[in-house]
Image (cartoon, grey):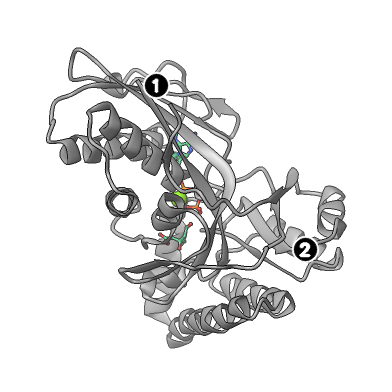
Amino acid sequence: MVTSSAPGKVYLFGEHAVVYGEPAVPCAIERRARVTAEQRDDDKLRVNATDLTLDGFTVEYDGSVADTPDIDVAEPLLEEGMGYVNQAIEQARDAAGAQDVGFDVTVQSAIPLGAGLGSSAAVVNAAIDAATRELGVELDPREIADRAYRVEYEVQDGQASRADTFCSAMGGAVRVEGDDCRQIPDVPNLPFVVGYDGGSGDTGKLVAGVRDLREEYGFAADTVEAIGDIVREGEAALEADDLDELGELMNFNHGLLSALGVSSRSLDAMVWAAREGDALGAKLTGAGGGGCIVALDPTEGTETALRYTPGCEATFRAELDTDGVRVES
Ligand SMILES: Nc1ncnc2c1ncn2[C@@H]1O[C@H](COP(=O)(O)OP(=O)(O)OP(=O)(O)O)[C@@H](O)[C@H]1O
Ligand SMILES: C[C@@](O)(CCO)CC(=O)[O-]
Ligand SMILES: [Mg+2]
């Protein structure tokens, strides 16, 4: 039996545009998904995902009897929930050259689901690491990231960047542009504050929405390119340790994401509350539609403001996690 974990992330800049080849800078945060894999005697897959809660459901399902889940839960949610873990196990089998091994898999996660903090990438990275180690194979984090990317690409219907999976596999702040994935050395202390509306967005659908806009309107394609420009400016600000400039660029980035239709009333409300609470900057993080915002604020101001914001269910500080995917036991 092996347990591995991998961190979630916030985007300093560049989500969505990164899908179309612009650069992005996601940062791993100290909130992890833990996956335990134990080889079975047969070829079945049993997945126990006790934290798989969305819209008030708690699901425990058995991958081998997908048509008879333990509790009554919306089928698309069940299928979606199974997609990531099933495909991660497929990748582990492939990496170990063991096509018909079965596993008991347990997922426990401190990363809210579908909320822009990269729960899918963390679960997939941790599952690939745990299952391959259980089969006696130790993969390099870059290979785990690559295999996890293939999983996200499949589950998100052929539209994904390497950003979430690379960031979660390597830890720290990273820069991703197409297939070019690097860690960013010596980042300044980034005082991240997260606001969570308790909701979620469907990454696949939100990505498809941006794709359609881009195809329909030249100015939407320009907006995606402008996000790339913000990221390039942001990299210079990061290098110069200029937090004020980073904040300003985050604000601009949020405006453009909003123009692309991926914000929501509660995300906007939290962004404005953070700004009024004296954050240096604030934006939605991840796919959007609902879920989390990230603000930059070394003071208590943003957390206090968010606590009094209707629609904000939780707020917490998020420390940069320099550790990527790792074995726990
Ligand atoms: N604790 C968990 N147990 C099982 N599956 C999980 C768990 N956490 C996440 N997942 C899987 O990841 C999916 C959510 O991934 P999705 O990409 O939509 O959101 P996210 O990764 O949290 O946010 P974003 O991609 O915007 O950063 C869930 O529907 C589920 O399939
Ligand atoms: C919206 C997106 O850019 C980030 C989701 O966390 C999708 C992706 O990069 O695969
Ligand atoms: Mg995701």
Secondary structure found at label 2? loop
Q: Between marks 1 and 2, how big is the CA–CA gap?
A: 40 Å
The structure residue drawn at horizontal position 63% and vertical position 62%, both measured from the top left corner, is: 284
State the residue position of label 2.
297
Whether residue 72 sits left or right of residue 155 in the image: it is right
Is residue 84 visible in this depiction of the protein? Answer: yes
Secondary structure found at label 1? loop
Q: Quadrant of the C terminus?
A: top left
Q: Local crowd at mark 1 within 10 Å, few (<14), some, or many (≥20)?
A: many
Whether residue 22 sits left or right of residue 290 in the image: it is left
Question: x%, y% of residue 106?
Answer: 42, 24
Q: Indicate whether 10 appears above or below 144.
A: below
Whether residue 245 sits left or right of residue 145 in the image: it is right
Question: x%, y% of residue 203?
Answer: 45, 54
Q: Would you identify the image quadrant in which residue 142 lies?
A: bottom left
Whether residue 327 sits left or right of residue 305 in the image: it is left
State the residue position of label 1.
61
Q: Residue furthest top?
A: 41
The structure residue drawn at horizontal position 65% and vertical position 73%, both measured from the top left corner, is: 250
Q: Quick one: 241 or 252, which is closer to the camera?
A: 241
Q: Quick one: 203 or 236, which is closer to the camera?
A: 236
Question: x%, y% of residue 15?
Answer: 50, 66
